[in-house]
Image: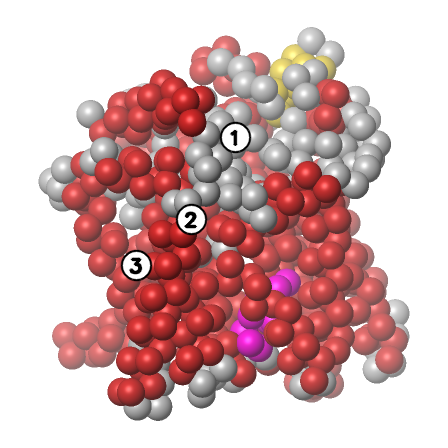
Amino acid sequence: MTAARVRAWLVRRWWALGIVLVFGYAFPHYPSIRSANELPRVYLVMAMADGGVAIDKGVARWGTTVDVSPSRGHQYSNKAPGSSILAVPAYVVLRGATHLLAGREPTLGEMVWTFRLWTGAIPTLLFLWLLWGFLARFAPDPAARRATIAIYGLGSMALTYSVLFISHQLAAVCVGTAWILAVRVAEDPSTSLRAPGLRSRGMLAAGFFAGAAPLCDYQALFAAVPVAIWVTVELIRTGRGWRPFALAALGAAVPIAALLLYHDAAFGSPWRTGYDASTTFAHFHQRGFLGLDQFRPEALYGSMLAPDNGLLLLCPALLLVVPGWILMIRHGRLGHALVSVAVALIYVAFISSIAMWRGGWQMGPRYITAMLPFVLPAIAATLQAVAARPVLRGLALGLGGVGVAIYAGSIVEFPHFPEKFKNPVHEVTVRLIGDGLAAPNLGMALGLPGAWSLVPYAALVLALWGAVVWVGPDRRARLTTTAIAVAVTAIVLVAYRGFPGGGRVADEAYARTVRPAVHGQMR
């Protein structure tokens, strides 16, 4: 390939390559905080690579956490095992490489980085590519789809849980992929009539990914229910017979069997989960069904509107789903709109009814990360509708910019919002930047100190988001959209500073936990 062709390829692909670089720019790994979500998963990877599921070796080496469950004289991860299963091949390669090149076992940091990349960043990047084609059904305009992808990939929980070894985003990728594949089989005439082999593989794969979702994160199963109902109606309506259902069931049987076998090996029964065996949070996990026992107004407010954890406060572009649903129905997409609405309602009800709704350290209500792919068509439909209206488009993208600033800014600092911070955007992220601190990143590898190492990253994020915003039929429209988007984003972020903080409790937590963790990794 000539230099000219390489340059042309880079010019065409720069935006996608920029997204890839955002996902890999920083490594926010802080050993001192002893991540209760990541460590048991790491331990389980090591155990599975050695042919078992007990994590005694990892616990003995690096210590226990609150998410380790005792059972029959051994220690086990109380997490669904899917992300750890997926990470086993990466661990085998990493272990072999470190033995060959350095004559030692891989360090904890090397394992965490590898597993995050393999089970988080790479699956999400592939899913963004899959979404690009799928969203064309709802937004033919590439600019509207690019904005939707950016809102999801740069400005939501999808980004946070792609750069951490926590399986919420992997489960979202699985169930979202199952939905997309099922839609293709049900609606695309080419896969239904002229390519029966492709149709069969599509349903088999859709079933596999649907089954893999709860293997990674139990509550991801909820999203599969409306999808299964819609697919069933479509297949019956079009007279496809029993074969697609059998193929989907066969595909789902493999990961579901793996989950049940894990439960049996670790906890003595296929139907007993790690949460059933948990001792630290037994008073939460053992209430009702999977911790679901009653509706809690405080959980609804805390998960949707509270300044420290509210989904709509941290990612206000999700407000675009309401007009989007209406537009989808008007444009003949009733079935997809009903699936989207049903999944959203299910997860809002779920997070409002689970005993442990706050979920510890998180950037938004992480237990409902699997919901996000299902609201993207509505966002895309809204952005498609305002594509030729610069003022409305600027308002919509201004809301999107808030999420991009919060999530893209926080993952390179401290991608956790502990409960003690009531205004964590300013009390954690902005404060760390003000103190000249940042997570280990590529800028530091190039010799840039402290927060200055984030200058290339900030320029990249601004360029990516700027390419989303700076679109229009003429210069005047582009200027109008950009001015309004920038103003809305800035006003909202400044207004968030007015939310009450955590006071002395938050100051002490920052001084004792957050600042030392980040500063310690910069040495």
The stretch drawn in magenta includes residue 381:
yes
Q: Nearer the viewer, residue 328 or 146?
A: 328
Front label number (2 vs 3): 2
Residue drawn at 46 percent across, 78 percent down = 392
Density class for disc 1 (Cα within 10 Å; few <14, some 14-19, many ≥20) is some
Q: Which amino acid does label 2 sit on?
A: Tyr
Tell me, for residue 419, which label it has, or none: 1
Q: How far apart are marks 1 and 3 (CA)?
A: 28 Å
Q: What element carries label 3?
A: helix
Q: Nearer the viewer, residue 457 or 256?
A: 457
Q: Is mark 1 on a helix, strand or loop?
A: loop
Q: Mark 3 points at which residue?
A: 461
Q: Give the range drawn in magenta.
A: 374-382
Q: Which of 130 and 318 is in front in this view?
A: 318
* Residue 131 place in picture, x, y as percent: 53, 68
Up-down: is 348 above or below 415? below
The kind of secondary structure the magenta stretch mainly shows is helix
Q: Name the residue under label 2.
A: 496
Q: What residue type is labelled 3?
A: Val
Residue drawn at 81 percent across, 76 percent down = 234
Q: Earlier in the sequence, mark 2 or mark 1?
A: 1
Q: Which amino acid does label 1 sit on?
A: Glu
Q: In this image, 500 relative to 286: left or right? A: left
